[in-house]
Image (cartoon, helix red, strand yellow):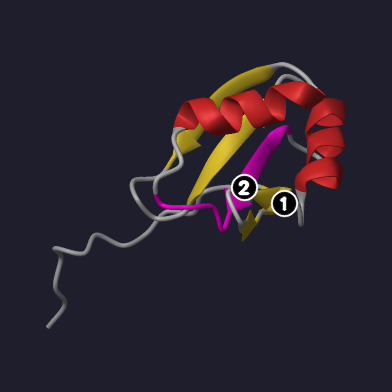
C-alpha cells in the first residue's frame, strides 16, 4: 500500500461516520471518516500507511451489521467532466 486512505464499501445505507470510526480505531488512529450519502460506501483515512494496511487486512471481508465489508486502498480521485456542459 502506498497511502493511508481506504475505500470501504458494501455497508448498510444507515451506517454513519461514527460507526466506521469506532470500527477502524481498533487498528490505529483515524484521521477522517466520510460516509458518502446513503450509498453504502465511504472513505477512512488512517494516520499511517502501516495502520491502514493493518485495518485493511483485518476488516476486508468482515461482517458489519450483517453485511460483508469490502476494504481496499482508495484510488486517487479523477476529474470528471461537467455534467451540465453539452457538446454539439
Compare residues 21 and 84 and report the one nearer the observer: 21
Mark 1 is surrounded, within 10 Å at the Cα level, by few (under 14), some (14 to 19) or many (20 or more) other residues, namely: many
Q: Is residue 64 magenta?
A: no
Compare residues 12 and 2 and report the one nearer the observer: 12
Quarter-of-image position of residue 53: top right
Q: Is residue 74 above or below residue 66?
A: above
Residue drawn at point x = 76 percent, y = 57 percent: 61
Quarter-of-image position of residue 80: bottom left
Expressed as whole percent of the image width and height from the top left, the position of residue 59 reads 77, 45
Q: Are marks 2 and 1 in contact (CB under 8 Å)?
A: yes
Expressed as whole percent of the image width and height from the top left, the position of residue 40 reads 46, 54
Residue drawn at point x = 60 percent, y = 34 percent: 44
User: Which segment did they paint magenta?
Assistant: 4-13
Q: Is residue 57 left or right of residue 19?
A: right
Q: Secondary structure at mark 2?
A: strand
Can residue 59 be seen by looking at this rendering? Answer: yes
Residue 56: mark in rendering: none
Compare residues 44 and 62 and report the one nearer the observer: 62
Residue sitting farthest toward the front: 66
Q: Quadrant of the C terminus?
A: bottom left
Residue drawn at point x = 82 percent, y = 27 percent: 51
Q: Secondary structure at mark 1?
A: strand
Between marks 2 and 1, how big is the CA–CA gap?
Answer: 5 Å
Mark 2 is surrounded, within 10 Å at the Cα level, by few (under 14), some (14 to 19) or many (20 or more) other residues, namely: some
Residue 72: mark in rendering: 1
Disc on the earlier residue, 2 or 1: 2
Residue 7: mark in rendering: 2
Compare residues 36 and 66 and report the one nearer the observer: 66
Residue sitting farthest toward the bottom: 88
Q: Is residue 8 magenta?
A: yes
Amino acid at each position: 500500500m502506498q497511502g493511508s486512505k481506504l475505500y470501504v464499501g458494501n455497508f448498510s445505507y444507515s451506517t454513519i461516520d461514527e460507526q466506521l470510526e469506532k470500527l477502524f480505531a481498533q487498528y490505529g488512529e483515524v484521521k477522517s471518516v466520510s460516509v458518502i450519502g446513503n450509498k453504502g460506501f465511504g472513505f477512512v483515512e488512517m494516520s499511517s500507511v502501516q495502520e491502514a494496511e493493518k485495518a485493511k487486512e483485518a476488516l476486508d471481508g468482515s461482517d458489519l451489521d450483517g453485511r460483508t465489508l469490502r476494504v481496499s486502498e482508495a484510488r486517487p480521485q479523477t476529474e470528471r467532466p461537467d455534467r451540465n456542459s453539452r457538446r454539439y
